[in-house]
Amino acid sequence: MKFSQIKEPSLQKPLMIAAMQDMGDVGSIVIDFINTNLDTTVFREVLPSYPAYVIDNGGYIDLPEEKWEYRSGKDTIVFGGGSGQPSSTEELNVLCQDVINVAKKYSTRFIYTLGGFHTTKPIGKEPKTFVTTTSLDMTDQVRKLGIATTPEASIITGFNGLILGFAKMNGIQGIGLYAELNEPKLPQYRSAKSIIKTLEKLTYQKLGDTSELDILADEIESKTRGKPVD
């Protein structure tokens, strides 16, 4: 992987929000929303060593323009978004360690990650967000805020789970937020909204007007209503 430091941001013990594209594009939707609303600026970029896929345009192929960005706002580092994740476990581990190195460099207080929580239970228009943390004490604090924790033991794969493990190994507090979704192959804007609202409660800050996410969710639902999802 290629890492490029574009500039040095001025940050004082920021919190970090780090997530990559996952089921329902939840990670990317939330990261893009936060970057837009916090008016963040890029200070570091990551390029994969090799493409994880190619794009068939109907008779000819293109290579994906994959890159992932570290961006900074007021006392906040935002990492991820974009498309895809590293194509190998080795590259995923290297990327997670880089996120930890950046967190340590700027004395990050917390790392928040987020993603989708697939369920077959109909969720309607108000999906719930479940939280898991890197310590039992923090889990107790989350529950005191009235926030639901993950209901059962499970394995969380990919960047949006593994980064919590790297945080724990390196003595950094971490919290994962995972919102219910029924259709992992469709963009899940209501799930993203649920995570944003929960993140606001955890961080005690407003992240922006989520009404546009409701509009986008309505558009997806009107286009797919009654149609099978491939």
Image (cartoon, rainbow, N blue to C red):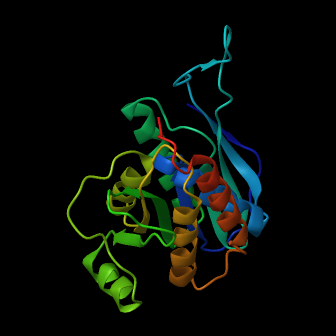
Residue 170 x/y as whole percent: 37, 60
In the rendered view, tell whether residue 5 sits above or below residue 180: above
Q: Nearer the viewer, residue 57 or 110?
A: 57
Q: Nearer the viewer, residue 227 or 133?
A: 227
In the rendered view, tell whether residue 90 sits above or below residue 106: above
Q: Is residue 166 visible?
A: yes
Quarter occupied by residue 39? bottom right
Residue drawn 49% across the image and 66% down it: 112
Residue 42 x/y as whole percent: 75, 52
Most distant residue in the bottom direction: 144
In the rendered view, tell whether residue 177 sits above or below residue 82: below
Residue drawn 73% across the image and 73% down it: 74
Most distant residue in the left direction: 153
Residue drawn 75% across the image and 68% down it: 37
> Horizontally, is 227 left or right of 46 in the view?
left
Which part of the image, by quadrant, shows the N terminus? Answer: top right
Residue 105 x/y as whole percent: 57, 59
Residue 89 x/y as whole percent: 37, 34
Q: Nearer the viewer, residue 198 or 100?
A: 198
In the rendered view, tell whether residue 188 sits above or below residue 193: above
Most distant residue in the front direction: 226
> Horizontally, is 213 left or right of 21 in the view?
right
Residue drawn 37% across the image and 51% down it: 162
Count up the numbered dots. Answer: 0
